[in-house]
Image (cartoon, rainbow, N blue to C red):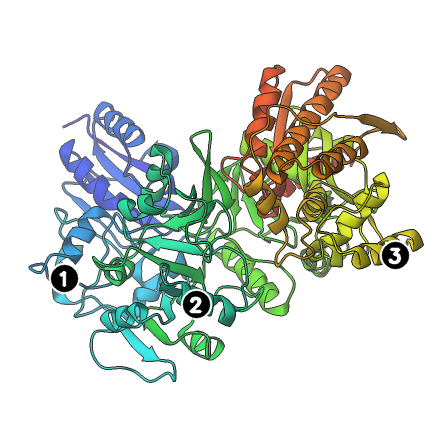
Amino acid sequence: MATDLTYKIEIRGIVQGVGFRPFLHMLVSAYGLCGRVRNTSDGVELYLTGDRERVDVLLAALRENPPPLARIESVALTQTDLPPFTDFRIEESRTLSHRHALISPDVGICADCVRELLDPNDRRYRYPFINCTHCGPRFTIIRDVPYDRANTTMADFPMCEACAKEYGDITNRRYHAQPDCCAACGPQTFFLDAAGARTEGDAIENARTYLKAGRIVAVKGLGGIHLACDAYDEAAVKTLRARKQRDERPFALMCRDLNAARALCTVSDAAAALLKNPARPIVLLPKRDPFLLPYCSENDDLGVMLPYTPLHVLLMGTDTDALVMTSANLSDRPILYKNEDALAALAGVADGFLLHDRDIHVCCDDSLLSVVAGKPYFIRRSRGYAPAPVTLPAGADGLLACGAEQKASFALSRGADAFLSQHIGDLKNFETLEHYTRQIAHFERLFDIVPQGLVCDLHPDYLSTAFARERASAAGLPLYYAQHHHAHMASCMADNGLTTPCIGVIWDGAGYGTDGTIWGGEILFGDYAGFTRAGSIRPIPLAGGDRAVKEIYRVGAALLKDIQAPLPDGCDADKYAAMDSVLKAGVNCPRASSIGRLFDGVYALLTGRETVSYEGQAAVLLETMAREADEGYPVCIAEENGLRLFDTRPMLAEMLKQKRAGAAAGLIAGRFIRTLADMAVELCVRVRADTGCKDVVLSGGVFLNRKLLPQVIAGLAKKGFAVYHHQRASTNDEGIALGQLMIGAAQRDKDGKRQ
């Protein structure tokens, strides 16, 4: 037709590895158009021949109903002088001088592949690497873009004739599925005993035999290696704890299906949808019985996930309801993901090894979420979500945010996109730092980002800060500093698309304050460009400094000394007396305005417990024991040097008075949490009176407390505030890199205006 022209359409977003080109092929055929499509390092490049009206209708349909796993960020159409095409083809990918393609996260096995996996008549029956355009490995196998097999760890496995035929058949579900394979051409599993010797027979069945016998098996999955054992076998779980030196931290479970999960936990509709989401995260669920599987979790909750690879489906079989499935790593080290490293590091830990020969290029821990107000709430954002970008409310182009030290992560910005890394771990050793720097380099290459500036935490001793200083100095780049709690506030603002000044309720364990002291119970007011500290809590001296994080009786002794109250029953008189002497001397007793430490001290005084095995454990246990309380203790606000401070002494005195009178510890704990919520509301009301601001953001690890968070939200809403919490990034330190990007961009803008 004379009106038929050829148009070039450039599509950006998550449009590779999600069946986008096959989807386009079918869509173009349905609209009777012709043309070409190919992946580029920028996204997808589409040429269409036809009348403009029909092209516009097709693009509208594409935007409104893209492939389920795709995310379209932009569609740019230009008219060309190319001659008309007479058919439609998918062409070879093209690498451009720049790369703007987005990478799909890994995707859990789809229902169609499960059906084929378990069908004795299917040619992929019981093949543990079955996948299609709707599921399978993505981010963890990608070495480079564009997303083609040659740029993944599947390059070592050329397709057989049958797979190649499917790959080229537009009517097939595996049309242009890059990891497509079968038993004849794809990766293979194998099972090794504790000595590293290969065993005969079916590798997965050998692993199942070991698990049923109460043994511990290292299982190589999608983003790393897990240690697995039967969750109902108390002796096996306790053996795993002893060997892994993980005394009390909860273990995640993999349940065979939703019914198996419901046998253990209360599963809401929102939680069920999250469990079945293609990302297949671990979801924190309330136990049906608080005393169920205490050796897996001493809390009221269990972290549960469903099988997300075909290997997991086969491992669970039809007769295994739940396995402990915990990351295989040494203390404070990254998750293991290489076969040889697992064999060396887990000698004496694992009784057997279920491994395979498909390399993991990027290790990636399981994501962990809870449900808040019916919506997902990140505790750890990793496999299934990284590296999908978070859209920023304002541009922060070309920055590298280096994150914190605990729950470390980083973020890179390109235009309005923030690429948040997967969970890295605590930056306290060389191995984790090496993993951190390697992942930064990988992200920079994948997303073609050359940082023009770096942002880091104020803390002078963080390894992430040292990395930022060294790199900025070596490259001659500007370095911007973001105060820890300001970054938390900015992160929650960016997470919710806010650009105007807010009140921030930022509560965590510790962060380096602008005055050189430890902060952690802050009420801030400000925006990305700056903040004022509008409120906090009465500082707590920490006898022994960092030792007080694990030896919580030290915090309890400081709180007790502050109110001059008698020693509660159950507390060791000698230890508290010794701490009293240390506190009087004042040597190595830094002061911390930390809600996290306040939880520690209160739990120590209520229970007599002296130590915890991981930071935040006391807060989790206090949350578990707390009963619902209709009212809290008196909220007393003092003013000191212009700063409003929550005076904890009246509250603590009343708590211990009730304890001496025989009140239940759970009731006291519930009233303590209620008091904190009341205090947050009272301070926000006072800041609103000063500023007129009605927007409040909540961030910091303390807001992982699922009894405190709803009370703070409800209390603020009742007073007429608009309340925002995290949705796309973690509320703990893992999420602050997002805020650092926005603070760095604001500082850069300010510097540019000065010049």
Is 169 drawn above or below residue 429 in the view shown?
Answer: above
C-alpha distance separating marks 2 and 3: 45 Å
Side (left or right) of 350 relative to 524 = left
Left/right placement of residue 157 relative to residue 696 reads left
In the image, taking residue 730 as reference, residue 750 lies left or right, namely: right
Q: Residues within 10 Å of mark 1 (few under 14, many from 20)?
A: some
Helix or strand or loop: what does disc 3 sit on? helix
Q: Is residue 729 left or right of residue 479?
A: left
Residue at image mark 2: 337
**Which x, y percent locates residue 152?**
35, 62
Q: Quadrant of residue 393?
A: top right
Residue 333 location (% of width, % of height): 56, 66
Residue 146 visible in the picture: no
Which is more toward the observer, 594 or 573?
Answer: 573
- Three-letter amino acid code of the residue under disc 3: Val
Mark sitting on residue 249: none
Quadrant into which the N terminus falls: top left
Q: Nearer the viewer, residue 467 or 319?
A: 319
Quarter holding the C terminus is top right
Identity of the amino acid at label 1?
Answer: Tyr
Measured as percent of width and height from the top left, residue 417 is found at 51, 40
Location of mark 1 (residue):
125
Give me the C-alpha separation between circle 1 and circle 2: 26 Å
Instruction: Please tell me which residue is depicted at 77% across the width and 30% down the height of the picture.
Output: 535
Disc on the earlier residue, 1 or 2: 1
Q: Residue 39, percent across and down?
A: 32, 49
Is 276 above or below relative to 140? above
Mark 3 highlights which residue? 582
Question: Helix, strand, or loop for circle 1?
Answer: loop
